[in-house]
Structure formats: structure tokens, C-alpha cells
Image (cartoon, grey):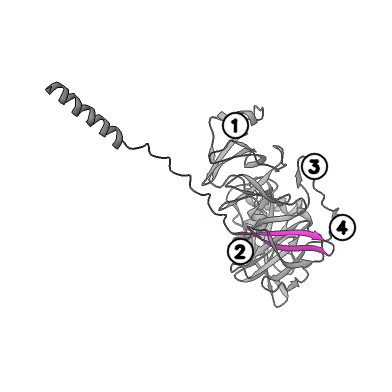
Amino acid sequence: MRKFFVLSLLALFCVSCAKTKKAPALAPPEPPPAPLTPMDLSVFDENEAGCVWNRIHFPGAEVKTIAQFPSTCAGADVVWSADLMRALVSFNPKHVSGSSIGGAKNDAPPKAQIGPLQAFEVDIATGNQTPLPPTKKLRGELELFGITPQGIVALSLESSDKLGKALAKEINKKKKTFQLSGGGEKISIELPKEPAEGTYAVAHAWLLKDGTWKRLESKFTTTGWDHGLGVNGLDTYHQFGPRAQMLLKVHSLPNAEELKEVGPLSAWTPQTDDERMRWEKQSTPHGELFAWMTGVEVDYMTGLLLYQPKGKEISPLPGLGFTKEELVALLIRGTWLLVGTKDIGAWPRVYDLRKGELAWSSDSARAVVFWPE
């Protein structure tokens, strides 16, 4: 009897435990996708009247026209003032070539239709524009315009075989300075302590004051090789506000990590014996970006770009169109990825990094960058 009673108590205890046993916890719900980052694009595109400068707001792709210019968009560039209230817009015939996609050359107009370098000062709020005065009397060849805290500037490059040989002669003699004459003044140029690579030249900066150009500085420089600075070596250049073509000179992913093991990328890895060609990886809060790199002395990103949104498979960016033979510039802002041709910003493609989907593209726009903040 006692045995039966004990067994009954054990049975009741087991039943009680079974009833009070907790159900397995449910997996936490996936967090909602990050909201799209508001951002604007600066876009130059051609229409019947010439070249229009638009500011396109995302999400929504709402277009606001900033200014209209009586020229093609070939060679378009823009430099903003530090406060982003003014801009210097220029059209440089030197920057019309080299833009392509999918192996096809860009449809830039012939140089004969482009004319000389043109520049306009633009009031961002009103769109009012003022053409800059002629620069024919500046030393050397005009390279670009910009805005600094001092005002509007022009940068020119003085280069010739005669000048290069004269500079080389003084450098080999260990001279500290070179006296550059002509143009109504003598200019003392500080020389490097050792010979440099590339072509020797002199860069000049000019300030627009009271309607005329006044020389600000002159500096020894080199061109014709990967590390040649040209006019970019001037102190004045480093006082510029944001500049489209400078933003498009990116050589690598923002926070790149070189991949030693290609693993799942092997299906897309080109066959090559060149050790300089490799994959780089960029982690973002929304996924992993992979770029096929090339270069000799300087690394460059090619149009072979893959993306893996969180929780999804790796695949090429849809609708990109670039190839591994083409160089691209890649910019990231929040939830957005912008890809276009290096230096020129043509054939732009904008992607939603949350999903890896194409959000906007153009086959005619130029100098496309994120609007500075």
C-alpha cells in the first residue's frame, strides 16, 4: 500500500512538471531594415539648351535645377566654396576622353565642338552665374579653377623642353632656387634637393581681384608619371572647397581589407599571373563589398564589383555594366553606393546598400558625386 502511494506521488509530480515545462523560446524577429539615408547628388547632364546642373534628392529622386550653361557637359567639373553657398563650374576639354562602359567609348563630342576651357561663378541659392574674365595673359597653360578663402583662383602649368632642361641643370648642380624670368617679372622657384622622376615644370596660382588675375604663388612640380602632382602641388590647391573631380580620383575602397583567400569569390576571379591584381573587401553596416584591383605604382578599382547584402548571396552589382578593364570611382554615403568612371564621373549608378538594388542610373550624366555636406 505504501509502495502504491509513493508511486502515485511520483506520477503526480511528473505530470505537474510536464504541465509547467516552458515552451521553447521563439527566435527574436529580424530587425527592420535601416531607413534610407537622405542624400543629394550633383549631376551635370545635357539638354537642348546646353548643359544643365541638377541637384537630385534621394529617396525619391526629386530634381532641382541649379543652373544652365551654354556648352556641352564634356569635361564638367565643380568646386564648392567652404560654406557651400557658391561654386565654380568649369568645362575642360582635357577631361572628355577615357570615359567608357562595357568596353564602349563614351559619346563625348569632338574637341572641335567643345571650345576652350570655360568657367562660371554660380550662386547656389539663386542660380545666378557670372563668366570668369579671360586668362590669356597667365603664364603656362590653364589647368583648372577653384574657390579658396581668399577668393576665386586659377591654376596654370608652365612646361616645355627648354624649361625642363634648365630646371634639371640647376637641380643637378644642387642649387636651391631657380630664377624664372619673362612675363615682366622674375620669380624665384625653390628646387628639390634631389632629382625627381617625371617631367619638370612650374605650377602657378592666380587670384581674381578687381577683375584681373594676380599671381599668388609659383612652385616646382613634376608631371607625366603616377606620382606627378602638377598644379595639385600648389598650396593654393589645398585650400579649395570640395571638388567633383578630386572626389572622383579615389584609388581604393574607403576602408579596404585585402583578401588573402578568395574563397567564394573564386567563381568571379579573373585568370591572371599578375600578383598586383587582387580582391579588396569593404565592410558596411548593410553588407560586404568586393572590388577587383589593378595598378602598377598606384592601385585602382576596376569595374568588377561584387556585393553581398546581409543574409544574402554574393553577386555582381545589377545593371553596373563596367568591366574589369575599366577604372571606376566608388563613393559610399550611409545606405547609398555611387559608382561612375574614375576622374570623370560618367555612367553613374546609385545602389541601395540595404538590398544591393539599383536605385538610379544615367548613361549621359557627367561629374556625378554626392552633394557635399
Between the residue at mark 1 and the residue at mark 4, the CA separation in whole angstroms equals: 45 Å
Q: Which mark is residue 104?
A: 3
- Helix, strand or loop at label 2? It is loop
Q: Are marks 4 and 2 in contact (CB under 8 Å)?
A: no
Q: Callout 2: 10 Å neighbours few (<14), some, many (20+)?
A: many
In the shown orientation, is residue 84 left or right of residue 20?
right
Say which residue label 1 marks: 265
- Count of numbered tags: 4
- Helix, strand or loop at label 1? It is helix
Identify which amino acid the numbered label 2 is placed on.
Gly
State which quadrant residue 51 falls in: bottom right
- Helix, strand or loop at label 4? It is helix
Residue 180 seen from this side = no
- Furthest toward the left, the residue is 2
Identify which amino acid the numbered label 1 is placed on.
Leu
Identify which amino acid the numbered label 4 is placed on.
Gln
Give the foreground label among 3 and 2.
3
- The mark that comes first in sequence, 3 or 2, is 3
Q: Residue at x 70, y 78 (%)?
A: 210
- The mark that comes first in sequence, 4 or 2, is 4
Magenta residues, dominant SS class: strand
- The mark that comes first in sequence, 1 or 3, is 3
Between the residue at mark 1 and the residue at mark 3, the CA separation in whole angstroms equals: 26 Å
Can you give x and y, in whole percent of width and height, for residue 163 in the image?
Answer: 73, 54
Give the foreground label among 1 and 3.
1
Residues drawn in magenta: 32-61
Between the residue at mark 2 and the residue at mark 1, the CA separation in whole angstroms equals: 39 Å
Quadrant into which the C terminus falls = bottom right
Between the residue at mark 4 and the residue at mark 3, the CA separation in whole angstroms equals: 21 Å
Give the foreground label among 4 and 3.
3
Say which residue label 2 marks: 241
Q: Which mark is residue 113?
A: 4
